[in-house]
Image (tube, rainbow, N blue to C red):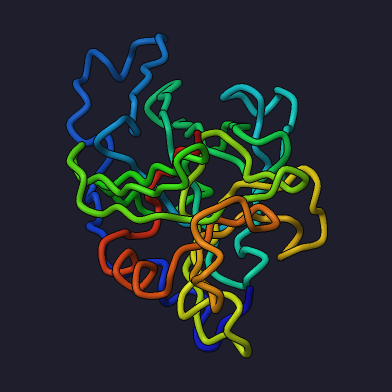
Amino acid sequence: MRRRGSPASAAFAGVALLAVLFAGVAGARATSPISHRHELTNATIAHWAPVLRRVAAHRRPDASSRVVAKVATVTSDWTQNIVLVLDAIERNPGETWFRVRLSILPNNSTGWVPRDALGNLYAVHTHLYVNRATYTATLKRNGRTIFKTYVGVGRAATPTPAGEFYIRDRVAGFHEPFYGPIAFGTNGRSRVVTDWPGGGFIGVHGTNRPGILPGAVSHGCIRMVNRAIVRLARLMPLGTPLTVT
């Protein structure tokens, strides 16, 4: 997927900045050797951050632990790369690590990155659910349904992977109508399609063939009619978690 215009412009629209993550730490806590863990993503709220510099993601919140992935600053669509932040650990007052979702196989992989490799945290209250059995997509805000539509998902030979993902970027301005007017990139990866699109990433996009929906019709991406993807784009900010069942 490719778009025209600035690669980073869409990544910061429509979400509120969290001014300070760990303000007001008590003096007694500052001297404690105990790590403090904070949950930053759950069923009703999630947090994401832009990647400021290429960074290694580690198996544990420790620079000496095994590296599980390299996290880049841009996506394969040449947009600003963002990561969904699941948890934070303060090992001491000057060392904080974030556990983030990774864009690698196997799907549902996570890793720990140092706080200073990421930008400001942004909060979202939406969550997109895709049910492959019923061919439906449902967007919830604060746990309440605000959008629902039928979709197409992957064929048996090229299935849409199940798991926990997130909406990583938004692209438009395609040279042909296959993707519809808008497409959302996710961190989900196809295990069988390794060279389409952008290295096998799963997208959520429109279609120029609405008559084939709903059904198992795609190479792994989630398709919906164009009027639905346009409406979804008004309701779903970047960083929204995606659950595929």
Tell me what residue is drawn at x 41 percent, y 10 percent: 33
Work out whether residue 60 or residue 94 is closer to the camera in this orientation and state it.
Answer: 60
Q: Is residue 13 above or below residue 45?
A: below
Compared across the picture, whether 45 is left or right of 60 comes to left
Q: Is residue 176 above or below residue 207?
A: below
Tell me what residue is drawn at x 56 percent, y 82 percent: 3
Compared across the picture, whether 165 is left or right of 149 comes to right
Using the rendered view, name the quadrant where residue 212 is placed: bottom right
Using the rendered view, name the quadrant where residue 79 is placed: bottom right
Tell me what residue is drawn at x 71 percent, y 24 percent: 64
Q: Residue furthest front?
A: 211
Q: Tell me where residue 1 appears, x and y as whole percent.
A: 63, 73
Q: Is residue 236 above or below residue 192?
A: below
Compared across the picture, whether 5 is left or right of 105 comes to left
Q: How many marks?
A: 0
Q: Tell me where residue 5 appears, x and y as whole percent.
A: 51, 88
Compared across the picture, whether 169 is left or right of 145 comes to right
Tell me what residue is drawn at x 39 percent, y 68 percent: 229
Work out whether residue 195 or residue 133 is closer to the camera in this orientation and state it.
Answer: 133
